[in-house]
Image (cartoon, helix red, strand yellow):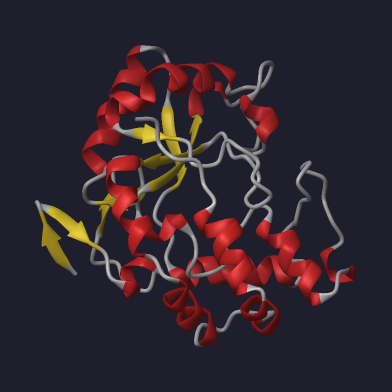
Amino acid sequence: MGLLMGRCILGPLELTGRSRTHVIDNKDISCVLHRDVVRPFMAMRRAAARAGISLDPASGFRDFATQVRIWNDKWTGQRVVHDRRGCALDVLALRPAARVAAILNWSAPPGGSRHHWGTEIDVYDRSALKPGARLQLVPAEYRTGGPFAELTAWLDDNMDRWGFYRPYVTDRGGVAPEPWHLSHAPTARDASKRLRIGAIRAAIADGGVLGREALLKALPTIYARYVRAVDRPPK
């Protein structure tokens, strides 16, 4: 990993979550983020607090091993897999290719997740979550009438001030829309340009990923539809 204009240049290991040299652990929010994302996120969080919103991360940096664990749990049915409407599926009844497609609705392939970069944050409003309620990270929570509708509106009006935007708003037939997923555009832009399909293939091939054969067979389509096909940040 080198430096360009004071910023980290991510190599294949960082881009696929197999190295942590680009991230730091922010204990104030119990979240690991890219070193260039910590300051803008904390500034945005303070501004949200002044508006009565507790902007908290549900997930930040996710290493390769964690993404493999999520993928494998979904592959074996230990973790719920949803269709694009948010309905639970009987994943064990699906053939390998269909099972891969079902998991990809809401989970990136190991090595192909933007969360590996530390530039992505899944957020919610802790103060709006009712006592005993469990965070689900489903679109209904962020729409009108949902507990995080106010958060959605506040982010719509303010997040670009700190360089954040939502990469999964438009349904492009790949990753389903995720209103909770924020990306720090200035930092993620370079990572996106540098991530190549070969790095993802190498990570999957050696990473203990279940369904590996079906995943690798579909990887060119997955790379185009799920990794590259994201919304661009506003100018």
193 left or right of 86 in image: left
Residue in the image at 59% along x and 19% along y: 149
Q: Residue at x 12, y 57 (%)?
A: 4
Q: 122 left or right of 74?
A: left
Image coordinates for residue 179, horizontal then vertical, percent:
56, 34
Count of marks, rendered view: 0
**Residue 39 falls left or right of residue 215:** left
Q: Residue furthest bottom?
A: 206
Location of residue 83 with respect to 163 vertically, above or below: below
Q: Quadrant of the C terminus?
A: top left
Q: At which x and y percent is residue 3?
A: 12, 61
Q: Residue at x 59, y 71 (%)?
A: 220
The image shows residue 23, relative to residue 124, as above or below, that is below
Work out whether residue 189 or residue 133 is closer to the camera in this orientation and state it. 189
In the image as oriented, which residue stretches furthest toward the left? 5
The residue under the point 50% across, 27% down is: 125
Is 83 or 57 nearer to us in this picture? 83
Residue 188: % across, % down: 34, 49
Residue 190 quadrant:
bottom left
In which quarter of the view is residue 28 placed?
A: top left
Determine whether 220 is above or below 231 in the image.
Answer: below
Instruction: Name the image quarter holding the N terminus.
Output: bottom left
Q: What is the residue that sits farthest to the top in this orientation?
A: 51
